[in-house]
Amino acid sequence: MLTVAYSADKPAVYKVKKLKVSMKIDANWEKAEWKKVKEIPILNFMGQIPAFQPVVTAKMMYDAENVYLIYKVEDRHVRIQNTKFNSPVSTDACVEFFFSPDEEWPLRYFNVEINAGGTAVMAYHKDGKRTNVKEEDFKVVDVAHTLPKKLEQEISEPVTWFLEFKMPLSLIAKYGNLTQPEKGVRWKANFYKTSSRSTNPHYITWNVVQNPVPQFHLPQYFGTLIFK
């Protein structure tokens, strides 16, 4: 599928398709429910361009009770060391979803970071204050991944890995204001891939982030999600 590099003059927009029936969360990129869903190209590098450039795409859907995301990563130098909830998973091979679910307050946002082994970080940011999501609350999120939970050493050779998750809207509403997804509703968001402590560190975004050093916590540079 053709992908487009977004620029500062052309902010990214993604139309989120509604899922009609329930589906199993199994990290299967090829399953029928995802087949006709448009890809999200994550291809804007921040900071120094790495020697190896991972190829990263995502897809997103929603229903009345959940949001769904799946990532496909064509990677090398894959590091997975963190296995504890809310540990620094961005130092590993990691995909991330930052989003503002309240149309009235686009600078109040959640960050969801999940490494290739399925270990996650989630927090809510409101007016400069960070609130970490509790591990027992995050257990309602269904996460599937194709790589092991931990690697004793990096996978240096080429490997394609997948990660999929289903997040209940009730979890989002427990920590912040929520504009219920439905036709025409807009959220602000950005999608990322990173691995800051691998032998091939990199920082990749969906919407362009205009910052001299890699930094994902800049909601003013989020793109737009439009629910269909």
Image: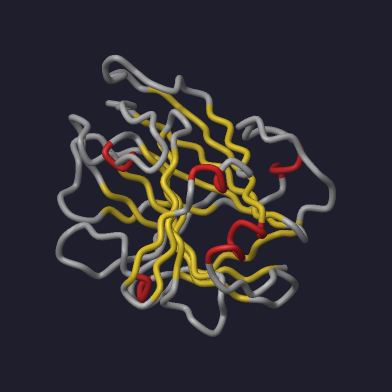
Q: Is 48 rendered above or below residue 116? A: below
Q: Residue 209: where, in percent of width, then height?
A: 30, 66
Q: Quadrant of residue 191?
A: bottom left
Residue 183 position within the rendered picture, expressed as x and y whole percent measured from the top left:
75, 73
- Which quarter of the rendered picture does the C terminus lie within? bottom right
Give whichever of 46, 140 is nearer the camera.
140
Q: Is residue 136 left or right of residue 223?
A: right
Drawn side of residue 56 relative to residue 71, left or right: left
Count of numbered circles in the view: 0
Above-or-below relation of 112 to 10 = above
| Percent coordinates x, y for residue 28 in the rendering | 64, 31
Residue 159: which quarter of the image? Answer: top left
Above or below for 78 versus 94:
above
Residue at 58%, 32% in the rendered image: 144
Query: Residue drawn 58% across and 36% down?
Result: 143
Residue at x-position 41% and y-position 46% = 121
Q: Residue at x 60, y 75 (%)?
A: 186
Q: Going by the picture, which residue comes out furthest to the bottom?
A: 104
